[in-house]
Amino acid sequence: MPRTVRCCARQRAGGKQMKQRIERPHARRLSLMPLALIAILVLVSMALIACDPGERVTIENRTDQTVAVFDNGNQRNLIAPGDTARYAILIFERGTMTFTVKNLAGKVLASQTFTWEEITEADGITIVVQ
């Protein structure tokens, strides 16, 4: 049930003082309007950030074996023979990022290290494993 704000106004009617109730149910809704606008702006901002494709790293596996992809030493996933994997990197602030591709026996087949500036200038990085 909506909360109403009541105030009193004194009126003279026939020589008597009377209290008149003035109900303003819209007063509460007006106070919620700025909060609703802020919430909408936050949601729109989050949607725009989520739509940012970032910079792309593409790894092509042209070998006849499954390979494992590592990002700064952390395994990302496996790529089947002949498949391609794409990774979107939004940003990293310091230093470099290294993508390493290994076969399932642990032998390094390809490795590339780059800075954020290098990946943005190149408009993405492609690593081909042969």
Image: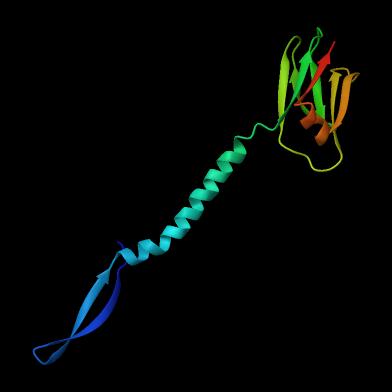
Q: Is 105 or 75 nearer to us in this picture?
A: 75
Vertical arrangement, residue 111 with respect to residue 42, above or below: above
Which residue sits furthest left? 14
Left or right: residue 47 compared with residue 110? left
Vertical arrangement, residue 84 with respect to residue 118, above or below: above
Q: Quadrant of residue 116?
A: top right
Q: Quadrant of residue 130?
A: top right
Which residue sits furthest front? 121
Q: Position of residue 33 (x, y in %)?
A: 42, 58
Which residue sits furthest bottom? 15
Left or right: residue 44 compared with residue 8? right
Q: Position of residue 11 (x, y in %)?
A: 18, 85
Q: Which residue is pictured at 24% across the width and 82% down the height?
A: 9
Left or right: residue 6 compared with residue 15? right
Q: How many marks?
A: 0
Q: What colour scheme governs how the chains and residues are painted in the rendered image of this protein?
A: rainbow
Q: Quadrant of residue 50?
A: top right
Q: Which residue is pictured at 34% across the width and 67% down the height?
A: 27
Q: Which residue is pictured at 82% across the width and 15% down the height?
A: 128
Q: Position of residue 74 (x, y in %)?
A: 81, 32
Vertical arrangement, residue 9 with respect to residue 39, above or below: below
Q: Position of residue 69 (x, y in %)?
A: 80, 24
Q: Quadrant of the N terminus?
A: bottom left
Which residue sits furthest right? 107
